């Protein structure tokens, strides 16, 4: 139970840290718009009108404004806090793949590195019993 709770809390923190809550709210808004439009027009027209972006519902406007404010805030605070202002492309060396290898002594130590085995005593028979 504790493991499930910690996993749920971790996933919830990741969900909010990445801003995915706005994706969920936007999906809800699109579904609501589509069902409203589908009641008065054919499905294809309702889908086109929903996803055209020309007419925004109140929820879509809130999501758009919040995302814009979040981007402005992250860009403004990025320079003062030492954060990157944008995504940086990761460039790999153009000369090919490089591989780091461990020396053979690390992979398979010599037999002298292991302690000698001590003789084992046989287990007591019969096994000890707890006092009742």
Image (spheres, rainbow, N blue to C red):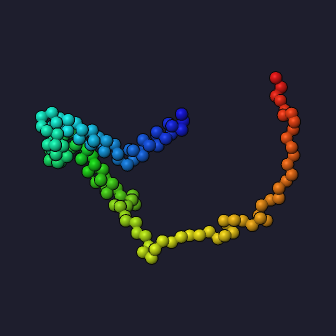
Going 37% across and 65% down the picture, which residue do you hit? 89
Is residue 50 at least partly visible in the picture?
no
Going 67% across and 66% down the picture, which residue do you hit? 106
Quarter holding the N terminus is top right
Foreground of the two, 89 or 127: 127
Going 84% across and 34% down the picture, which residue do you hit? 127
Give the quadrant of residue 126: top right
Going 46% across and 74% down the picture, which residue do you hit? 96
Q: Does residue 23 appear to the left or right of 105 in the view shown?
A: left
Percent coordinates x, y for residue 39 in the rendering: 15, 33
Percent coordinates x, y for residue 101 in the rendering: 59, 70
Residue furthest bottom in the image: 95
Q: Does residue 42 appear to the left or right of 8 in the view shown?
A: left
Q: Does residue 10 appear to the left or right of 60 in the view shown?
A: right
Percent coordinates x, y for residue 129 in the rendering: 83, 29
What count of labels does the image hold? 0
Foreground of the two, 74 or 126: 126
Give the quadrant of residue 78: bottom left
Image height check: is 84 above or below 12?
Answer: below
Give the quadrant of residue 27: top left
Quarter holding the C terminus is top right
Residue furthest top in the image: 132
Is residue 92 at least partly visible in the picture?
yes
Percent coordinates x, y for residue 76 in the rendering: 31, 57
């Amino acid at each position: 139970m504790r493991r499930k709770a910690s996993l749920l809390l971790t996933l919830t923190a990741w969900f909010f840290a990445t801003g995915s809550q706005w994706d969920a709210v936007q999906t809800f808004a699109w579904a609501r718009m589509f069902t409203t439009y589908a009641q008065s027009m054919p499905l294809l027209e309702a889908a086109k009108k929903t996803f055209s972006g020309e007419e925004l519902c109140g929820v879509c406007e809130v999501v758009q404004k919040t995302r814009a404010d979040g981007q402005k805030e992250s860009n403004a605070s990025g320079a003062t806090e030492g954060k990157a202002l944008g995504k940086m492309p990761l460039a790999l060396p153009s000369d090919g793949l490089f591989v780091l290898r461990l020396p053979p002594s690390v992979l398979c130590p010599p037999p002298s590195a292991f302690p000698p085995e001590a003789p084992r005593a046989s287990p007591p028979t019969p096994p000890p019993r707890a006092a009742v």
